[in-house]
Structure formats: C-alpha cells, structure tokens
Image (cartoon, grey):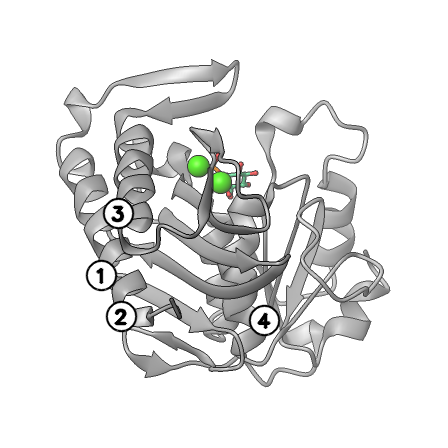
Amino acid sequence: MPISLAILEKITREAGNIAMRHFNDLENVGITKKSSRDLVTDADVAVELYLKEALAKAYPEYGFWGEESGQSDNLSNRWIVDPIDGTHSFAKGQYFWSISVALEIDQDLVAGSVFAPALDDLYIAAKDKGASKNGKTISVSSESSLADSMIATGFACLRSYLEDNNLDRFSRIAQKTTGQRRFGSAAMDLCLVADGQVDAFWEQELNLYDVAAGALIVKEAGGTVTDFKGKEGVFPKQILATNKNILDQLLLLM
Ligand code: IPD
Ligand code: CA
Ligand code: CA
C-alpha cells in the first residue's frame, strides 16, 4: 500500500498526545536508567508501544525498529522510530523534544515525520515531494557565509568517554560562526535546519532512529546530509546537515 502522509501525520500526532499526557503530569512519570546517564521514562515506552501497534495496523507489510523495543524481522522495509528524542529535556520539563518516525524501504528513506508536541510543531516529508511544517512548505536557509551562520550540535554525555567527544570540533567551529545552539533533540535539530532556523547541524555517534526522519526532511527542504568528509548519505556516526551553501566551509573544520 502506498504510504499516506495524512495517516502518518495522524499517527504521529496521536503519539504526541500520549507523550503530552505524561509531560503534563511529570511528577508521576516513572524514570529509570538504561545505563548510568541514559534515561528512559514511562512516556518513551508508552509512545513506542502505541506507534508499533498503530503503524502495524495501518501498514502490516512493514517491519518496525524502535529505540526501546528493538527490531522486528523485516529489516528491509521498516518503520524506524525514536519515541522520544530528547528524553533528558522531556524529563526536565523543557520543550525541545520530539517523536521521530521514518519509513525505510530497501535502505532508502521514503517518508518521515517529526513532531514536537510541546511546541505543537509537526514536520513531515516524503521522498521527492518536499517537506512541510504545520502544513506549510519549508526550505533551508540561503545563508552563504559561515561567519554569519547559526549552527546546532549535540554532545552525548553518555559517550563523553570517547576520545573524539566533539569538544575539539565544537571549539574549532564555534569560533568561526555567529552562534551555536544545543537544543537536545537531534531529530529537532535536523528539522530546524530544514526550516532555516539554523544553517547547519552536526553530531556524532548517533543511531539511525535519532536521525532517519529528520535527515529526509532536510533533504526534501533542499539541504544536504553528509558525513564529516562530505560523502552524501545518512551516516548517524557522523552526520552533517547543511543548507548546502556553507557545506564546503564547514567541511574544512570537521
Ligand atoms: C538524544 C538526543 C540528543 C543527542 C543524544 C541522543 P535520546 O536522544 O538526540 O540531542 O545529543 O546523543 O542520544 O536519547 O533523547 O533519544
Ligand atoms: Ca534519540
Ligand atoms: Ca529516544
């Protein structure tokens, strides 16, 4: 069955409603640690369970890979889900967290939606069909000077032990731009590039469920998604999303 963006949006919005019920009652939300600095809340689990069931009901032919429940059998045609991207922000009562849902067919991302329920912003895209935010077409910024650019990045505290933990790269790039931001949700960071609110985003050591939907949204909004050497594609261990104009300037600093 061809994918309907209207159905994808409806399911993602309902997932957002479930997350918001928990967000509005944070003191009663169970929070446990997957590892020393990696949180999981009742909302992560409830949203993923809902998405797994709702997507299977609407599209039984596709498999499912979610951060919290893992992978189903169908590895080539599957939904790739991060139920809450930005769990730490969620748990602190901040607004920058999102639900990320992507459809991958034969290793090609064909649809993606990212919903930030606390901001009521829903980004959605289908391959070769453009990207939109809350029903309006979006495109990346036209900024062509790195010196005048605003760039987002992320630091995974749980991966701070890595020799390359992004701090050197951050200091190099921060000195060459007008502004740096750390919002706390990679899926949202990518959507902000797609919407021209920031001119680029990079992060490293992520997983495909963090970036699959957002990367498609960036590409459909006219941006580029590469690794740190400029190779096009979605490489979660080294992801660089730009408005295209400042790609070469950034690559020199990666
Ligand atoms: C995290 C967010 C954050 C990024 C972390 C991710 P989670 O996802 O995307 O922005 O810096 O590396 O792990 O754990 O909240 O789903
Ligand atoms: Ca995530
Ligand atoms: Ca998550």
Residue at the image position 68 percent from the left and 39 percent from the top: 205
The secondary element bearing badge 4 is classed as loop
Task: Report the residue marked by disc 2.
Answer: 6
Does residue 111 appear in this view?
Answer: yes
Task: Report the residue marked by disc 3.
Answer: 54
Q: Amino acid at mark 3?
A: Ala
In the rendered view of the protein, which quadrant contains the N terminus?
Answer: bottom left
Residue 86, image x, y percentages: 42, 40
Q: Nearer the viewer, mark 4 or mark 1?
A: 1
Residue 191 lies, with reference to residue 15, above or below; the image says below
Q: Nearer the viewer, mark 2 or mark 4?
A: 2
Whichever of callouts 3 and 2 sits on the residue coming sooner in the sequence is 2
The secondary element bearing badge 1 is classed as helix
Q: Amino acid at mark 4?
A: Asp
Whichever of callouts 4 and 1 sits on the residue coming sooner in the sequence is 1
Task: Report the residue marked by disc 1.
Answer: 10
Does residue 93 appear in this view?
Answer: no
Task: Report the residue marked by disc 4.
Answer: 199
Residue 58, image x, y percentages: 28, 55
Q: CA distance from mark 3 to mark 4?
A: 35 Å
Whichever of callouts 2 and 4 sits on the residue coming sooner in the sequence is 2
